[in-house]
Image (cartoon, rainbow, N blue to C red):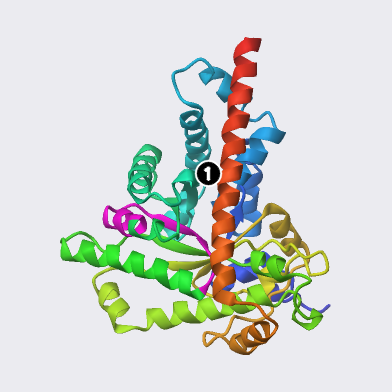
Amino acid sequence: MASINAEDVMKPTQKLHELGQSLWLDNITRGLLTSGTLKRYIDELSVTGLTSNPTIFDQAIKKHDFYDEAIRARASSALSDEELFFELAIDDLTKAADLFRAEHDRTDGVDGFVSLEVSPTLAYDTHNTIAAAKDLHTRANRPNLFIKIPGTKEGLPAIEEAIFHGVPINVTLLFSREHYLDAAEAYMRGIARRVAAGKPAHVESVASVFISRWDKAVMGKTPESLRAKLGIAIAQRTYKAYRDLLDEPRWQKLAEAGARPQRLLLASTGTKDPQASDTLYIGALAAPDTVNTMPEETLLAFADHGTVDGVMPPDGGTCEQTLAEFTRAGVDLNALAATLQKEGAEAFVASWTELIACIAGKRAALRKAS
């Protein structure tokens, strides 16, 4: 009988993990925690962290009764509806952080993170973003909990200040190489200030670049030969910038002082094109020392039938040729990146507004019922 090679039976998710890419779940609900599903994903699918956003919480509270008991208990309290939400979110995310704590400890603080976002209404408010980030970090009281701050023009100084104060940051709503580099500069400024002040240089951060929204934005507007290729090319261009930055003397100086790289995180990796593979952005974006955060449906699809299509080339491969084709087809990449960031911020505000209204409605109904 022929022997079975371990490589033949290794799950696709484990292959990615072994390659050096962290697989994070882009989802959090109380049901995932209480059912043991998240623990199973950790044990069986190599999931080593998770992200959340207002849309995820909005859908979870609208569609399920997981949160009714907790809302009922606080229904008559003096908490505002927004404050009540953050209590619910912190409760969920600290429990999730505790599940990932073993991974966090095993990797000496590199992996095993969860993320909690400041109110999306602060996307263009530097001062209040800084205050909110510090407050949420203190309240959560977990070393493996990122505070998410958008990489808008107003968010960048808040990111620098939060890093200076030792708050681990997930920079969100990045859409391009230029957005990523702006976030990296803010991170390095915060670290450099810590070094100059005699503080430890080690504050973890990730920079989240959104991928699939690029392809959705140009769907039907460019030649069919370019279908589902823009997001991957943007990711490859950004990955090259990430790798190049880590070779620069100014980063090496910070690294020698004890700083760690702000890891590149590939976000929005669920396929939105019905004609494309449901695991398109997972297999194509494999890269060591990065993170891919994916919706639950995408995680399960990749575990079932995904393949790792090699590793993203550190030099960007053919991404510039591909991006040039989009430019010739009439796509203004810089303008589209700005539009996607603006629309992303607006979408999160809309979800936030719905979320707070949903909590208010449930709160009133539960208070009346009791």
The percent coordinates of residue 132 (x first, y second) are 37, 42
Report the quarter where the C terminus lies. Answer: top right
Magenta highlight on residue 161: yes
The percent coordinates of residue 17 (x first, y second) are 58, 67
Range of residues picked out in magenta? 158-176
Residue 359: image quadrant is top right
* Residue corresponding to mark 1: 96
Lateral position of residue 357 relative to residue 200, left or right = right
Residue 63: image quadrant is top right
In the image, residue 112 sits, relative to residue 311, either above or below, namely above
Q: Does residue 292 appear in this view?
A: no
Identify which residue, 296 or 170, lies in the foreground.
170
The percent coordinates of residue 202 (x first, y second) are 30, 62
Identify which residue, 200 or 365, lies in the foreground.
365
Residue 303: image quadrant is bottom right
Amino acid under disc 1: Ala
Q: Residue at x 63, y 11 (%)?
A: 368
